[in-house]
Image: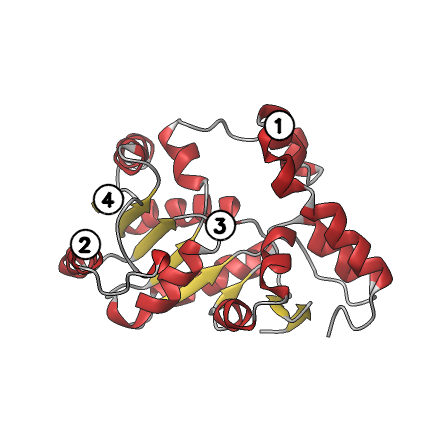
Amino acid sequence: MDSIKIFGVKIHNITFEEAIEEVKYFLKGKDLKTIYTPNPEIVMGAKDDEKLKALINNGDLITADGIGLIYASKIKKKPLKERVTGYDLSMELLNIANENNYKLYLLGGKDGVAKAAAENIQKEYPNIRIVGYHHGYFKGSHNNKENHEEELKILEAINATEPDIIFVGLGFPKQEIWIDTNKNKIKGKVIIGNGGVMDILSGNLKKTPDIYRKLGLEWLYRLIKEPSRIKRQIVIPKFMFQVLFSKDVIE
């Protein structure tokens, strides 16, 4: 796949439809494939962290989740084709799973969130085989406790069911670290770090209205709903400022 790098972070230059074709191909394979969906916050977090940058760049499918990445690529004359969000990819994965009777495992969120998400998914997508779920508050690779007995039990539970698709909602960068550390220990086809998607599926977090999504303003909607996010959201104008006034932003 064609790709560019924004501040050294790889982004595959594909449309949503092309991404879905890749996912379908992954699901027909034997090895686990990793999906990451960086936005400006993630790119800025990895920009000066070589370990985190390399981790993301090792993903099998890396798509531009944030509209800021699309703007940056256009400003620097190396345009990305389209924004491909983690939410949209996750929803399409559910459609594919429902059509093919695939198995799904859910990992992440507060206690009860993955369970509620599983119940809601089962109602809307009755052909999906939900083979397990676990909250995200356990000791493991994502909090510097690799191979802790809690993590090992989760890996054992996942492998016992051999899921086709695994949703990991631990938030950035924990979910990416956990996936990268454990990807060679997991029996599955596709694993995706999808942040707050599980909260939306559980009903604990309201889906961003379509008008905000179409305009690429999910961040503004979340900021309006949760003003405390201002410390996180300030990274967006900082990202755009550095894009405008830095050289060698994109390669």
* Callout 3 amino acid: Leu
Q: Is residue 38 left or right of residue 185?
A: right
What residue would you read off at disc 2?
150
- In the picture, the disc for residue 227 is 1
What residue would you read off at disc 4?
133
Residue placed most toward the observer, 247 or 194: 247
Judge the density around disc 3: few (<14), some (14-19), many (≥20) Cα neighbours within 10 Å.
Answer: many
Kindly indicate whether the residue at mark 3 contacts the one at mark 4 (C-beta within 8 angstroms): no
Q: Earlier in the sequence, mark 4 or mark 3?
A: 3
Where does residue 184 sit, x and y in percent of width and height? 29, 73
Kindly indicate whether the residue at mark 1 contacts the one at mark 4 (C-beta within 8 angstroms): no
Picture quarter with the N terminus: bottom right
Q: How many marks?
A: 4
Q: Rounded to the nearest whole Å, what is the CA distance between mark 4 and mark 2?
A: 14 Å
Position above or below: 230 against 181: above
Where does residue 87 sit, x and y in percent of width and height? 50, 44
Q: Earlier in the sequence, mark 1 or mark 3?
A: 3
Q: Rounded to the nearest whole Å, what is the CA distance between mark 1 and mark 2?
A: 34 Å
What residue would you read off at disc 3?
89
Judge the density around disc 1: few (<14), some (14-19), many (≥20) Cα neighbours within 10 Å.
Answer: few
Judge the density around disc 4: few (<14), some (14-19), many (≥20) Cα neighbours within 10 Å.
Answer: many
Q: Earlier in the sequence, mark 4 or mark 1?
A: 4
Position above or below: 234 against 140: above
Residue 233 seen from this side: yes
Q: At 22% across and 57% down in the image, what residue appears?
A: 151
Q: Rounded to the nearest whole Å, what is the CA distance between mark 1 and mark 3?
A: 27 Å
